[in-house]
């Protein structure tokens, strides 16, 4: 008797699958980098929520945070790392596998 | 598998995929305009310079001054406008550098050929040079808008 194949949902990445972090990864996937304010406006969350979720993704090494200055104004931007892009692509493929039934 | 990932249906997966597509597209909506404006400005300046070079060369005075002043404004434009760029689309750095280097390479070639081979002006050279610089600058602008 053969073992049934594992359902694709077991391959979903738990770090990425959280709603806000999923939205962050989706927004960053098409960008080289996104300013903090543009990212916040795109996914419609507060500054504190976005900061917290970005920290989690940065700790997982999926996202890189860059802080710079435009004159005296601090500017923060985020971008996906190579690992982050690979993980995101795999996550989307898993969703397609689930969607395909 | 856990409570978050364990009970996903095909419909939920499709909804998530659609949401990912939508967010990815909307997040970079306004990311192209500063660089597009910059390249459009370079297109205008470069093509007007070529016509201006013909005029001053025919007149016999001011070609070097015209070329230097337009070149300086071109450099200022190329430096200032990208500062308005807060977010960038995927592949922006490579596209921007290749477009900028391509434009200024053509600019230098056009100036050199004009100064060396057409010192007294020649519409048959300067009009095509103006068109070429305009085309390259505008192509770079549209390249960023369509990315």
Image (cartoon, helix red, strand yellow):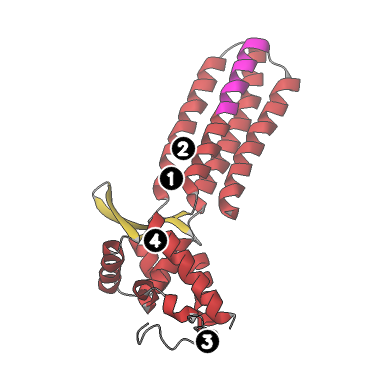
The answer to whether marks 4 and 2 mark residues whose Cβ atoms lie closer than 8 Å is: no
Q: How many marks?
A: 4
The answer to whether marks 2 and 1 mark residues whose Cβ atoms lie closer than 8 Å is: yes
Q: Which mark is nearer the camera, 3 or 2?
A: 3
Mark 4 neighbour class, 10 Å CA radius: few under 14, some 14 to 19, many 20 or more: many
For residue B103, side relative to residue B118 (left or right):
left
Helix, strand or loop at mark 2: helix
Distance from the alpha carbon under mark 4 to that under mark 2: 32 Å
Q: Are labels 3 and 1 assigned to the same chain?
A: no
The answer to whether marks 3 and 2 mark residues whose Cβ atoms lie closer than 8 Å is: no
Residue at 36% x, 68% y is A40
According to the picture, the residue beneath numbered tag 2 turns out to be B78
Helix, strand or loop at mark 3: loop
Which secondary structure type mostly characterizes the magenta part of the structure? helix
Residue at 29% x, 64% y is A60
Numbered range of the magenta stretch: B105-118
The answer to whether marks 3 and 1 mark residues whose Cβ atoms lie closer than 8 Å is: no
According to the picture, the residue beneath numbered tag 4 turns out to be A84
For residue A16, side relative to residue A74 (left or right):
right
According to the picture, the residue beneath numbered tag 3 turns out to be A1
Q: Which mark is nearer the camera, 4 or 2?
A: 4
Q: Are labels 4 and 3 assigned to the same chain?
A: yes
According to the picture, the residue beneath numbered tag 1 turns out to be B82
Q: Quadrant of the N terminus of chain B?
A: bottom left
């Amino acid at each position: 008797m053969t073992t049934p194949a594992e359902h694709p949902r077991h391959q979903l990445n738990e770090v990425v699958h959280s709603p806000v972090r999923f939205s962050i990864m989706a927004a960053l996937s098409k960008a080289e980098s996104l300013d903090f304010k543009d990212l916040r406006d795109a996914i419609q969350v507060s500054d504190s929520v976005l900061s917290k979720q970005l920290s989690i993704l940065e700790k997982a090494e999926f996202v890189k945070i860059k802080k710079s200055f435009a004159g005296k104004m601090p500017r923060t931007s985020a971008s996906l790392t190579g690992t982050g892009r690979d993980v995101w692509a795999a996550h989307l493929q898993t969703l397609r596998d689930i969607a395909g039934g | 598998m856990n409570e978050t990932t364990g009970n996903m249906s095909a419909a939920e997966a499709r909804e998530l995929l659609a949401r990912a597509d939508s967010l990815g597209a909307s997040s970079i909506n306004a990311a192209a305009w500063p660089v597009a404006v910059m390249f459009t400005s370079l297109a205008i300046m470069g093509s007007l310079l070529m016509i201006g070079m013909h005029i001053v060369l025919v007149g016999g005075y001011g070609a070097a001054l015209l070329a230097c002043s337009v070149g300086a404004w071109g450099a200022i434009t190329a430096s200032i406008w990208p500062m308005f760029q807060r977010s960038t689309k995927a592949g922006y750095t490579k596209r921007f550098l290749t477009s900028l280097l391509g434009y200024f390479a053509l600019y230098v070639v056009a100036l050199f050929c004009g100064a060396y081979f057409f010192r007294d002006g020649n519409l048959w050279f300067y009009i095509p040079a103006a068109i070429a610089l305009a085309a390259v600058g505008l192509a770079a602008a549209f390249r960023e808008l369509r990315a």
